Amino acid sequence: MPDHYDALEHRAPEAREGALLAALPAHLVHAKAHAPAFAASLAHVNPAQITSRAALAQLPVIRKHALLEQQKAARAGGGNVFGGFSALGFGKQMPRVFASPGTIYEPEGAGTDYWRMARAMFAAGFRAGELIHNCFSYHFTPAGSMMETGAHALGCTVFAGGTGQSEQQVSAIAELQPAGYIGTPSFLKIILEKALELGVPLPSVRRALVSGEAFPPSLRDWMMAHGVDAYQCYATADVGLIAYETAAREGLVVDEGVILEIVRPGTGDPVAVGEVGEVVVTTLNPAYPLIRFGTGDLSAVLPGACPTGRSNVRIKGWMGRADQTTKIRGMFVHPEQVDQIAKRFPEVLRARLVVTGAMAQDVMTFRVESASASDGLAERLADAVREVTKLRAAVELGAPGSLPNDGKVIEDARSYQ
């Protein structure tokens, strides 16, 4: 179809699901054989049995802090800089290495469109034979390379603008006349404002693909008023493209190479469609086979299909951070502890720890949803909270649906004034 990057985007959802799950067992075999970290974490897993989402949900979630800790431990001992998660060694098969905050090091494997970004660029309106002005960073982080390799796969030429130097960016755009911009939305706004200040028209920039920051409707409308039709995509330095915006502007469509789950923060438990939770991603990337990678970002699945005809699942986009670890009365309380408490009581449907009060006067309230609370549930919950967190909390029981659907399991509502 001319409006789609390829036929994968409009295949039947059951065909897509079947293809991804059918490829999963072999991917697990490969990960266990070539990535020592997975050989250890999946030692007791039979890949042949991981053929459904329910089976996948039983595997451990790898979160960024664990990835960082394993990398640091391996480096300190003179071991693999990637903590045993990469299936590649240095050389032609790994043309580049990047770093993200922490420091977490990420390998870039060889091959066309390694980060799978071309699909998002196509949805944003870019086409083969165009010049793209790329203002993502080319050093340390992979963003510049992610976009450049995607543009090359699409058949585009790239100007490596990088970051900063707004006046020079304006000059290059005015002279080269690129078809559009790729970079953060805030830097595009800076460039457009600088062009207005200098009195330099930029008539060629009519489209943009932005990422790396929140992209609120107000900023999207400001850019449209200045002649730029901008779309966003959601990607990470660890797994590449996760989802992208289309002309429908109704959420973000999940990439074809991604198995996406939304789980309750602090757990690996998938939530219902529409419920906010942490984005967990599995990609079938043999070079860096991250399986059930917890992005630390909150989102939710949207019901229905994209009006553009793309049939994959859609998510709402970035809705905040899932790591809600909070320091209360000098003690760290983690989302995993809230889940640990809730799972002790079958009648608890959802739970949320709310922290109020002023600095050094913290008040904890453990709020739960329950359809049929048994006698003494509140008291037993209070005891469990104290046992797990070593802190006292009041308990409030509520009806199903009484807690906000925002993905929070720890809410810090303290006053810091």
Image: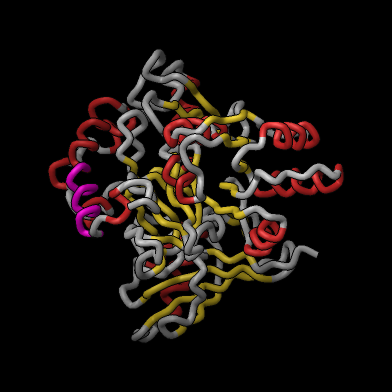
Q: Is 414 situated left or right of 157 in this image?
A: right
Q: Residue furthest top?
A: 91
| Residue drawn where x is 57% and y is 32% of the image | 144
| Quarter in which the C terminus is drawn | bottom right
What residue sits 39% from the left and 44% below the top?
A: 293
Q: Position of residue 318 (x, y in %)?
A: 53, 57
- Numbered circles on residues, count: 0
Picture quarter containing residue 27?
top left
- Drawn side of residue 215 relative to residue 279, left or right: right
Camera-nearest residue between 336 and 146: 146
Q: Residue at x 45, y 78 (%)?
A: 379
Find residue 10 and report its horizontal and vertical position in percent: 30, 56
Decide: is 322 above or below 190: below
Name the main secondary structure of what is drawn in magenta: helix
Q: Is residue 97 left or right of residue 361?
A: left
| Nearer the observer, 23 or 6 | 6
Q: Position of residue 254 (x, y in %)?
A: 39, 53
Q: Is residue 340 visible?
A: no
Is 203 situated above or below 270?
above
Camera-nearest residue between 161 and 242: 161
Choose top left, top right, bottom left or bottom right for residue 182: top right
Q: How did the renderer colour the structure?
A: secondary structure
- The structure residue drawn at horizontal position 28% and vertical position 49%, both measured from the top left corner, is 7
Could you say which is closer to the camera, residue 316 or residue 220? 220
Q: Residue furthest left?
A: 48
Q: Is residue 260 above or below residue 349?
A: above
Q: Is residue 17 magenta?
A: yes
Q: Is residue 12 visible?
A: yes
Give the percent coordinates (x, y) of residue 346: 31, 73
Is 77 colored magenta in this rendering?
Answer: no
Q: Which residues are magenta?
A: 13-23
